[in-house]
Image (tube, coloured by chain):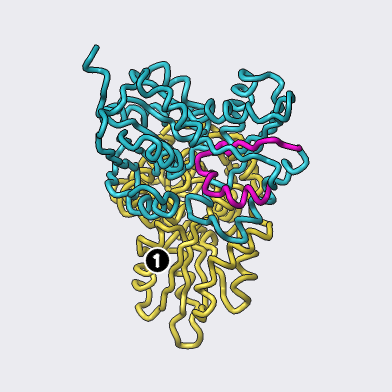
Chain colours: A cyan, B yellow
Amino acid sequence: MDNQRYDERPIGLFDSGVGGLTVLEAVARRFPEESFLYLGDTARVPYGTKSARTVERYTLQVADCLLRRGVKGLVVACNTASALGLAALRAQSPVPVIGVIEPGCRAAATLGGGNRAPRVGVIGTRSTVASGAYPYHLAMLDSAIQVISLACPLFVPLVEEGWVDHPAVRMIVTDTLTPLFTQRLDALILGCTHYPVLKGVIAETMGAGVTLIDSSAAVAEELRRHLGGEIAPAPRGATQRLAFLVTDVADRFKETATRFISGIAVDAVEMVDL
Amino acid sequence: MDNQRYDERPIGLFDSGVGGLTVLEAVARRFPEESFLYLGDTARVPYGTKSARTVERYTLQVADCLLRRGVKGLVVACNTASALGLAALRAQSPVPVIGVIEPGCRAAATLGGGNRAPRVGVIGTRSTVASGAYPYHLAMLDSAIQVISLACPLFVPLVEEGWVDHPAVRMIVTDTLTPLFTQRLDALILGCTHYPVLKGVIAETMGAGVTLIDSSAAVAEELRRHLGGEIAPAPRGATQRLAFLVTDVADRFKETATRFISGIAVDAVEMVDL
């Protein structure tokens, strides 16, 4: 129908906390006419230590809140929620749903040497790693890909608390990543939207031979494929609106968010009860 | 009434996660005939970064779960919940409620030198410190007590993840506590039930001149005052039963708990939905 060719409604993005802002920054820059509504489930962060059943329930609750606000599409900007809640959400969402895992896997799958399939490391929360979502999706793309997964449970609290540039952080990152040093990796997927904040120290620790994959660029590319297809784009010349919902303590979210993302203003923060 | 002089029902204890086990260990040893039912709200840990309203709501929900299981008294073995939820809980609980803050304050208030009131440091979660509960209760005991408060937001994730004996932990503890070094403290209240797990490194960092106050002994003393008074004790010769409820991932709770408390078996762990 003609009236569906443009849609001014925002795209909803969500994460357990501030991590998904790394994805928001990428998509907001790439699509300057699209509006976005971000939800950080700050009352229940972290998701990465919680069970599959709990994360699935939280994912559906958060998506429902965004859908009631009238979003035209959903980006699950949280790897744990993508790993454990995406199937259930896709089964019942009336709008298209984009996760962060498949785009990251597609980016990694192209990185082999010559005609050799790549050796891919995946770091994520305990729950993301336990889910097996990355090995599964990488194998769907190319069953010859070697996957080595590692849970890094302290990285999320470090980032949520703003400890990103401290010798202790370097020590924790190095110590945690040690099992990967001897794995001759071609690529390392930052399998948690909080981790790009630690990208500098992770890159130094892993060395120049390992390509780091930050899923936010891959998610932006995935969204491009949807816009104009399943998701109607905003009208030409539309003014981008960014709004933020949190489930707890709006002030701290604003303060931490401002430290992580440089390009966009985190002003309109509203607290919601889920 | 005669039939109220003994009561075999357990005493309920709760915390956001594993921290309250330091209190459980103290009271279970001190009262070997009393039974205890522990609830760790592991699905929603940490409490210490959440708002007053949210923590109060969680406190009431958790207490309600324990009350429905038939406890004869409640110990709020979490400083954040004690700071933000105790008043509301006391107002509506049909059984006596003991918090961790007042007992710790009483222990600290006695530690001045000669006839000088003590200088007391308090470390806790962001929400506990923001609540002002410690300065308030210390001033009620002696308005001459000097109180210096400091939030240590990374200590809970370090303990929940089992990082307690690592050079990076020492670095984070030292760096976080630096503002207290010049304060000539007589005592430092470990104002979070997770912190006794880090007691060794905190003691080394603060030096021998500062007495560390672990509230668990003070809570046991408070419970002694209640037993036989407001709370009927278990019959002589009763066998102690310890049971555990968690709101998420029972296996991990068991594993982490076993590392923290040496004296008691963490066997009967049941998952509940709040």
Which residue: 57% across, 32% down?
A: A128
Q: Between A164 and B94, which is closer to the camera in this rendering?
A: A164
**Measured from the top left, where is residue B225 in percent x and y?**
45, 60
The residue to which callout 1 is attached is: B134
Which residue: 29% across, 41% down?
A: A243
For the C terminus of chain B, the quadrant is top left
| Chain of the residue on which disc 1 is drawn | B
Please indicate whether residue B184 sits to the left or right of residue B68 in the image: right
- What amino acid is at disc 1? Tyr
Please indicate whether residue A252 sits to the left or right of residue B36 in the image: left
Mark 1 residue crowding within 10 angstroms, few (<14) / some (14–19) / many (20+):
many
Q: Between A237 and A86, which is closer to the camera in this rendering?
A: A237
Residue A186 falls inside the magenta stretch: yes
Q: Is A67 placed above or below A260 here?
A: above
**Measured from the top left, where is residue B68 in percent x and y?**
39, 35
Please indicate whether residue A50 sits to the left or right of residue A266 in the image: right
**Measured from the top left, where is residue B163 in percent x and y?**
64, 52
Which residue: 58% across, 52% down?
A: B158
**Taking the image as drawn, is residue A54 in sight?**
no
**Measured from the top left, where is residue B199 in percent x and y?**
61, 63
Mark 1 residue element: helix
Residue B192 falls inside the magenta stretch: no
* Residue at the bottom extreme, as displayed: B115
Question: How many marks do you count on the picture?
Answer: 1
Range drawn in magenta? A184-206
Q: Quadrant of residue B139?
A: bottom left
